[in-house]
Image: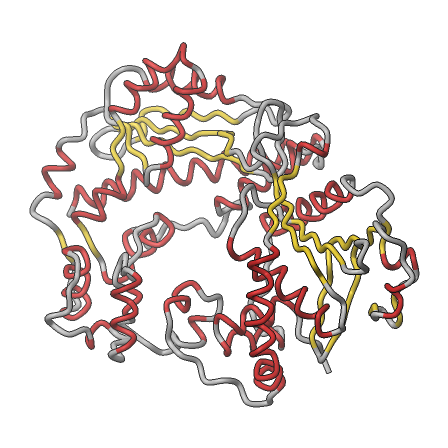
Amino acid sequence: MEYINKTVFLNYLDCHTLGWKTKRNLLPKLSGLNNELLTLEGKNIRKKALRLFPGAVSGKELKLEKAGVCCKEVLLDLEVNKVIYDMRFVADGFYAKHNILKKLEDNSWHLFEVKSGSRYKVKYTNDISFNVMVLSKLGIKVSKASILYLSNDYRLYMGYSKLFAETDCTGKVELKVQEFSNISNTAFEDLNSDNMPQPVLKRSCKNCPVFDICMGKGVEKHIFDLPRLSILQMDELIAIGADTIDKVPDDFKLTQRQKIVKNCVLTNTRYVSDNLKTELENIKQPFYYLDFESVTTIMPLYPDIAPHTQILTQFSLDKADINGNILKHYEHIADQTRDCSKDIAEKLIEYLGEAGGIITYANAERIIISKLGLLFPDLSEKLDKIIERIIDLEFIIRNNYYDINFHGRTSIKKILPALIPDMNYDSLDIGEGGEASAAFAFMAMGLYDEERINETKKNLLKYCAQDTLAMIRIHQFLINV
């Protein structure tokens, strides 16, 4: 029998079907550079956390485990204040692996769970509570439970004591453990049954990794195609059995945008507002199409930067005329060995000049340039003038155009196949933002040799340039409409 681990159990709490599928490894496998980076950094953070506990030893080193699993008896002989880590426990078919355990004077234990986030999150309580539940089933008393997460005050080269903040969540954990224990027997039966639990539509289905082969399989005109459904709206629609747009009552309260989408879906038409032409004509020539790429790592890559700080790493900039002809292409990528934010800001000022509309997709560029202005007061006036010229192409589309093939989304990757079918990112070695960020991080961490760095930078520039070219093509499509 395969044991029920934390991921299986917590997925079961969210959705019985998801938990059942998780236990049988039926979820899509995470892969790619972004996942590799998260795994690498997660292991690194756990190693650094152990520096807070001098003398801590692994269960394997102490030979506390029998058949790979620790039992209660082997813990009794440990001295007070002894710290052990990476212990594995099994009880009643549930399996838990603990980060750090410290023995207290009353023979109870203080459990520490190490997280890579930069603030305490509610979901961390669920994680640690599952582990405490398994220990309690073995008769091992946890009298204190703490989350260790990264401190925003930490900077590179500070001591490890500055790296982590601690939140005592013992009270919350006690309540959760009781809740988990009460449903553990039912969960065990459901998860080990040969019959998959019947899925039920709920809000979390929208972002579920198996939605397309579960509640969304074969369903056209799904209510999830309605953009920005509120929690209340979604709950009300699910409650009345309206899983598709054609089942949404005529008197159901929708936003203007949602009404437009509903009408397009029901009539199989696209929407073009009367205001689209005016908004496009208000963009001043020449047109500049700007796209940024950035990197965000758990541990700071450079001095004077907090954990999880977003750092601008490159940009692509196309200057084009009204017909979409590229008059000039500019691009810049950072030196991975240092923070080049100011260099990039100065290049932007140089290349963008003082006239012409700056077209971006979504609001990321505006936000990043605003942050650059705060970081570099000597450049803030010029950067503020750049911000005044920015036009968000996604905002224009969201308010003035809809195609039923958008399925309620307006991100550039979602709309491109509908508007420009002959253009995609499939031929690129790096074709997604998370992959681009991870690739740069690996370079900055010194994990690539010079040959691979040069090749990676070429691929990053190609990817970023594809984004600006996509904006040109989308803009031209809208003009033609």
Q: What residue sits 78% from the left and 53% below the top?
A: 102
Residue 183 screen position, x and y as percent: 56, 79
Q: Residue furthest left?
A: 274
Q: Quadrant of residue 218?
A: bottom left
Q: Residue furthest front?
A: 106
Nearer to us in this view, 299 or 93:
93
Residue 446 screen position, x and y as percent: 71, 32
67 relative to 281, above or below: below
Q: Quadrant of residue 387?
A: top left
Q: Which image quarter is the N terminus in?
A: bottom right
- Left or right: residue 217 compared with residue 182: left
Q: What residue sits 61% from the left and 66% below the top?
A: 7
456 relative to 231, above or below: above
251 relative to 358, above or below: below
Coloring basis for residues: secondary structure
Q: Quadrant of residue 206?
A: bottom left
Q: What residue sits 38% from the left and 28% below the top?
A: 317
- Left or right: residue 246 compared with residue 363: left
Q: What residue sits 13% from the left and 43% below the top?
A: 276
Residue 397 screen position, x and y as percent: 22, 46
